[in-house]
Image (spheres, rainbow, N blue to C red):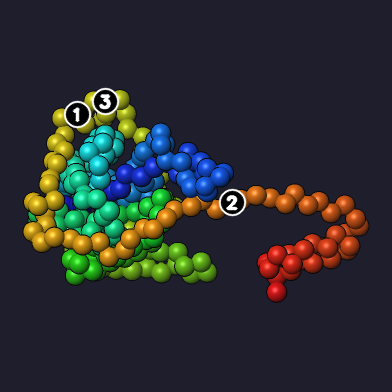
Amino acid sequence: MNIIVCAKQVVDVAEIKVDSSTKKPILAGVPQKISDMDKNALEEAIKIKEKHSGKITVITVGNPDAKERIKELLAMGADEGVLITPPDHADYHVIAHLLVGAIRKIGTYDIILCGEASIDMFSGQMGPRIAGLLNIPQITYAQTATVEHKNVISEKNLGEKTVTIESPFPVLITMTKESNQPRLPSLMAILASSSKPIHEWPVSSVITEPLIPKVKTIDIKGIPMQRKNIIYQDDLDQSVGKLVDELAKVGVLR
């Protein structure tokens, strides 16, 4: 199996603080990591490789320091990495075309795996965009990916029911956080990963025409999460009545 995993370097959202005066997130000094669900995608790729053999290539579109994050994925079990540094103000449109250009440059592939969404923006767009540009089938929000001789079978949870989907190769699958538990690489795997290649491809090597962003981010602000800390200590019926009235005043109930 030739497997491609698309991974994104993101800021650790758990470490972000919001400036109380400007409401803007403070990003300076926040550590970066590979988006959690992209690690789920890689873990699924490793499991497929362990069963069917093959090769795993990780593609990242990001700043040069993303090379350190790619090394973590190589230590987990990927065979090689590809890093593309995007132009300024790259949006989903630009990133998707860069990833597709890299995939086409790689050439042969059976499965493309992505996380269901990134933990920073959580749009869930990238997998479907890639599949659409490549004109291949896609299975989104998959909780399993069982690879057989000529096809892959996935299950996705729709709440009250589970849907089983079958697709031939090539296919793109986006994995959920519940799909597996990404492994922690051993010391030997970390040391061995230093010999695995990371290719740094310029934009011009994967895209020949200029890419113009379609979306412009005007501003980013944090949402204040202040609590009113109202405590009702009357008897139960009176407390419930007051609670309902208060929720109605703030627009929670209509």
Q: Residue at x 27, y 28 (%)?
A: 190
Residue 87 x, y percent position in the rendering: 21, 51
Mark 1 touches mark 3? (CB < 8 Å): no
In front: mark 1 or mark 3? 1
Q: Position of residue 194 (x, y in %)?
A: 19, 29
In the depicted structure, whether residue 194 falls above or below residue 20? above
Which mark, residue 224?
2
Q: What distance separates the C-alpha of mark 1 from that of mark 2?
A: 43 Å
Front-lying residue, 69 or 169: 69
Disc ID at residue 194:
1
Question: Can residue 110 be seen in the rendering of this structure?
Answer: no
Q: Amino acid at mark 2?
A: Pro
Q: Nearer the viewer, mark 1 or mark 2?
A: 2
Residue occupied by mark 3: 188
Q: Report the residue at 15% width, 30% height from top.
A: 195
Going from N to C along the chain, the mark reached first, 1 or 3, is 3
Cα–Cα gap, marks 1 and 3: 10 Å
Q: Residue furthest right?
A: 235
Question: Can you tell which of label 3 and label 2 is closer to the viewer?
Answer: 2
Q: Can residue 135 be seen at all in this image of the molecule?
A: yes
The amino acid type found where label 3 is placed reads Met
Helix, strand or loop status at disc 2:
loop
